[in-house]
Amino acid sequence: MKTLWKLATCVAVVLLSFSMYSCGDDDEDSIGSVDELVGMWEVVEHSGYEIEDGEREEDNPSYYVGRRYELKSDMTFNSYSKGSSNPSETGKWELKNGSVHLIFYYPNDGGYDYEDPDIMKIVEISADKLVWEYHWKETGWELYEKETLKKIAQ
């Protein structure tokens, strides 16, 4: 009887350890929350490059600084070109595993582009600052962008 009790206790301890391990935070590397992201964000710094067929071209930061992203609580977004009050692009957004997925809407090309969202990895976030980066690489072509944004409105 004591042997059976010891065996049952050992099995219980092993099962408990597995259940505790599986209850861990699945999004350990996640950063940011929907509440933190909702608002109007303006690009204040930009760096990036494009490599095509081995030739690297640096981005011109002045083209990107001043661009704005309005991330709404209904999970839609508007993107505004520098100095414009009319959205240049619209779509839906999601927060997944520490990245903002921008799903652009193309009315003349079938609607929402769910198959190829822009995935902006959150590097840093606070109440008024967001740093995200985008990296896309395929044969013969690579694109990298890193932007620092400041929150200008809730």
Image: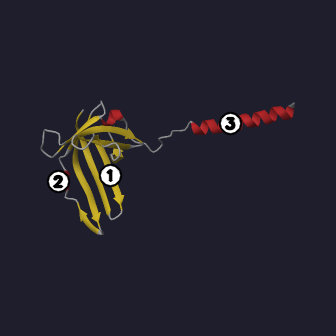
Residue situated in front as seen by the camera: 71 or 136: 136
Image location (x, y in percent) of residue 114? 34, 42
Mark 2 burial class by Cα count in 10 Å: few <14, some 14-19, many 20+: few
Circle 3 residue: 15
Residue visible at 27% across and 66% down in the picture:
56
Q: CA distance from mark 3 to mark 1?
A: 41 Å
For the point 26% across and 37% down, the residue is 77
Is tag 2's residue or tag 1's residue first in the polypeptide sequence? 2
Q: Looking at the rendering, in which quadrant would you find the N terminus? A: top right
Type of the residue with mark 3: Leu
Colour scheme employed for the rendering of this structure: secondary structure
Q: Quick one: SS at disc 1?
A: strand
Q: Is residue 149 visible?
A: yes
> Residue tagged by mark 2?
63
The answer to whether the residues at label 2 and label 3 have Cβ atoms under 8 Å apart is no
Residue 28, percent from left and from top: 48, 42
Q: Nearer the viewer, residue 118 or 85?
A: 118
The quarter of the picture where residue 90 lies is top left
| Residue at the image position 31 percent from the left and 33 percent from the top | 75
Mark-to-mark CA distance, 2 and 3: 57 Å
CA distance for labels 2 and 1: 17 Å
